[in-house]
Amino acid sequence: MPIIPLRDINKLERIPFQYVTVWLIGACILVYLYQTLVLGSGRDGDAFILGYAMIPAVLSGDASLPAKLGHAPAWATLISYMFLHGGILHIAGNMLFLWVFGDNVEDELGHVKFLLFYFVCGIISALCHLMIDPGSPAPLIGASGAISGVLGAYLVLHPKVPVWVLVFWRIPLRLPAWAVLGFWIGFQVFMVLRGANTAGAGEDSVAWVAHIGGFIAGALLILPLRRERSARTVGRWP
């Protein structure tokens, strides 16, 4: 991504601190450390990913994992896959987006509703990926589907909030959230249209369709959940 978010200018109003957002970030980091430092990148690490990733062929019943491989029930991988990551850039990028945009969505929904919202978006994201290729043996991992839902909700709630970003990794700019998140979802759609719509190896290792599904889910789900707003200045571009 040529645009990297750094921070937004959007104070919390209802909650004193984004406890759930921080918990989710901490949980993902702890699982990643377990993957890399305890299990490593060999057979044990691969077995852990296979056992807890969402594998479309397994979830659809077209395939099964070996009995000797410790693994979660297929339905449970719709949640467990969100805590697995494939590398330092994968987890760093996901956690940065969650840190920048998650707190204000949590502020809007409250802690419990936000956690449920996050998981529902992640589940819908995985199901969208499953629909594209139900027979795929490639494991789906990462929090990006759920975070995509957070981005969709943020765009609906705070489209005009200023966000500081790095463009091409080096140019700092302050842009409205609609420009940042609009570019993000546009990039996902572009990648799907050019044929990168599966989570396989190489260039197509990103589940673009899952991102789009999570984003749309978040944007739609936040509509009945958001609170009534009185006239105020938060979210207005100065």
Image (cartoon, helix red, strand yellow):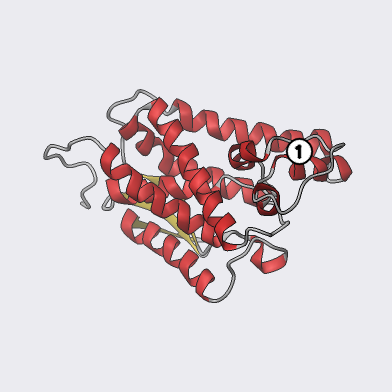
Above or below, comparing residue 110 to residue 66 in the picture: above
In percent of width and height, residue 88 lies at 68, 48
In percent of width and height, residue 16 lies at 35, 23
Q: Residue at 56% across / 35% down in the picture?
A: 25
Residue named by callout 1: 35
Q: Residue at 29% across / 26% down in the picture?
A: 14
Q: Nearer the viewer, residue 197 or 55?
A: 55
Above or below, comparing residue 174 to residue 41 in the picture: below
Q: Is residue 225 visible in this depiction of the protein?
A: yes
Q: Is residue 143 left or right of residue 203?
A: left
Q: Residue at 71% across / 54% down in the picture?
A: 62
Q: Residue furthest left?
A: 231
Q: Is residue 169 visible in this depiction of the protein?
A: no
Disc 1 is placed on an element classified as helix
Above or below, comparing residue 182 to residue 121 in the picture: below
Q: Is residue 65 left or right of residue 28?
A: right
**Residue type at mark 1?**
Gln
Q: Residue furthest bottom?
A: 194
Q: How many marks?
A: 1
In percent of width and height, residue 24 lies at 54, 33
Q: Residue at 65% across / 60% down in the picture?
A: 199
Q: Nearer the viewer, residue 223 or 131?
A: 131
In percent of width and height, residue 208 lies at 54, 61
Disc 1 residue crowd, few under 14, some 14–19, many 20+, Cα 10 Å: many
Q: Is residue 174 left or right of residue 211?
A: left
Q: Residue furthest front?
A: 61
